[in-house]
Image (tube, grey):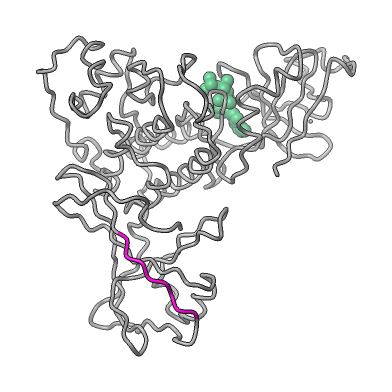
Amino acid sequence: MERYVSIEEIGDGTGGTVYKAINLQTSEVVAVKKMKRKYYDWEECINLREVKSLRKMNHPNIIKLKEIVRENNELFFIFEYMEHNLYHIIRERQRRPFTEEEIRGFMSQLLQGIVHMHRSEYFHRDLKPENLLVTDDTLKIADFGLAREVSSAPPFTDYVSTRWYRAPEVLLQSSSYTPAIDMWAVGAILAELFTLCPLFPGESEIDQLHKIRCVLGTPDWTLFSDARNVAQLMNIRYSEVMRPVNLADLIPNASLEAINLIKQLCSWDPLRRPTADECLQHPFFYANTWIPRPLADPLPLKIDSRGPQPNLELNLWDFGGKKDDCFLGLTLAVNPSGSNIEMVGKAGNITQDLLFCSDNEDKAQQSVFWSLFPPDPHGIQAPVESSLSLAFSNTIPHSTMGVPQSTGFRMPSLQPNFLTHVPSPSAAGSLSLTHS
Ligand SMILES: Nc1ncnc2c1ncn2[C@@H]1O[C@H](COP(=O)(O)OP(=O)(O)OP(=O)(O)O)[C@@H](O)[C@H]1O
């Protein structure tokens, strides 16, 4: 750890204390997490959840674990350094709420990180504002100390995540739960970004369930299998039905799209919560990104008919089953047989009419969203208007995914022995982490 010198303590959690430090060889600023317990062999370190999960993940919205150092039976994780966490940012913004655009920015990054994490077969289990680190406008998910493999066998008994963001099935001591618990936390965080205070600030586990019930109403005993435990744990009768509050009253600065998304994410029943992938296709993420054109003066939208023929798909999907919360997203997705770039080139000066939904990680899944107009046989000539955010009062069957997607650690004040101690080869070691 002689390569690192600590600058200041930046966080103290249950697992470790985190310091801002500088790598003397590279001058890189890093975050060093010094684990609280001792580790007597490497095997134990390598098998830690935080190590196992982070070694598997390489994504711009997931914190990078750069190196692991074990010295004197003490374990240090060297992470890329981030300037803030969302909890502090929320606290500082008490008089200046986030704009919906800012919230969309945070949420889309959080969801992209979660998509990668869930695809890597891990779920986080402790998503909360403190664990979402931010530098400038970039958000990264941190603290994988509780992360678990999706395939790992229940019962999950060692769960100690932060209560306010804990999904009901966890509070109800369900012995097996799914990545949907992360999606519950996303819903609670989304609401908090609007109101700047937690949605369910329970003071105990029972109070947590009570706060959830006050907002969501009594769960449907017939649909949600764990609902019976709610009654038992809260000592209430099945007949005691509490109506949900109107979330729009509780979160007055949120758009209808945002309210709809929060409602779905914070569903009692984990099966009703959208996946991170599905969330990214929710109309909340497309509000204000479409520039409508006045119908009276339509700009022609032309595609060179000599180029590759676009492959047209009409996708309908809904996000809810109830009459009042059904949201129908209606999008015509155009999958050019060439690249999107090529398509923009062919569309010439009308590129701003196209909404690009590209995932840096997966170029093959880029999509172009197109307006809903019938093609003109002589080229497409149509005024462009939004095809999203159409709310319908009837329900439609839930389709599957709708649209194609788019290191010496000198801490004299803390660890005086670091300065003098030369570790023996058997006592120390470090592991540099590179992702395949
Ligand atoms: N890479 C980093 N850059 C900057 N700050 C960080 C970094 N990693 C962690 N922190 C800060 O340190 C705090 C504690 O880190 P972390 O959550 O990893 O520790 P923990 O012991 O697992 O905490 P918890 O008790 O929440 O499980 C974080 O909330 C964050 O504010």
Residue most extreme to the left: 239
The residue drawn where x is 55% and y is 43% is 61
Residue 328 percent coordinates (x, y)? 24, 54
Q: Is residue 274 left or right of residue 15?
A: left
The residue drawn where x is 13% and y is 13% is 237
Residue 275 percent coordinates (x, y)? 39, 41
Task: Tell me the quarter of the picture where residue 354 sits.
Answer: bottom left
Indicate the quadrant containing the C terminus: top left, top right, bottom left or bottom right.
top right
Residue 90 percent coordinates (x, y)? 42, 35
Location of residue 238 with respect to 100 vertically, above or below: above
Location of residue 363 with respect to 149 vertically, above or below: below
Location of residue 262 with respect to 345 vertically, above or below: above
Which stretch is magenta?
308-315
Give yes or no for residue 356 being in the magenta stretch. no
Task: Tell me the quarter of the picture where residue 291 sits.
Answer: bottom left
* Labels in figure, total: 0
Indicate the quadrant containing the N terminus: top left, top right, bottom left or bottom right.
top right
Q: Nearer the viewer, residue 77 or 30?
A: 77
Q: Main secondary structure of the magenta part?
A: strand
| Image quarter where ligand 1 lies | top right
Q: Nearer the viewer, residue 257 or 362?
A: 362
The residue drawn where x is 45% and y is 63% is 367
The residue drawn where x is 57% and y is 53% is 361
Q: Nearer the viewer, residue 386 or 331?
A: 331
Residue 307 percent coordinates (x, y)? 50, 83
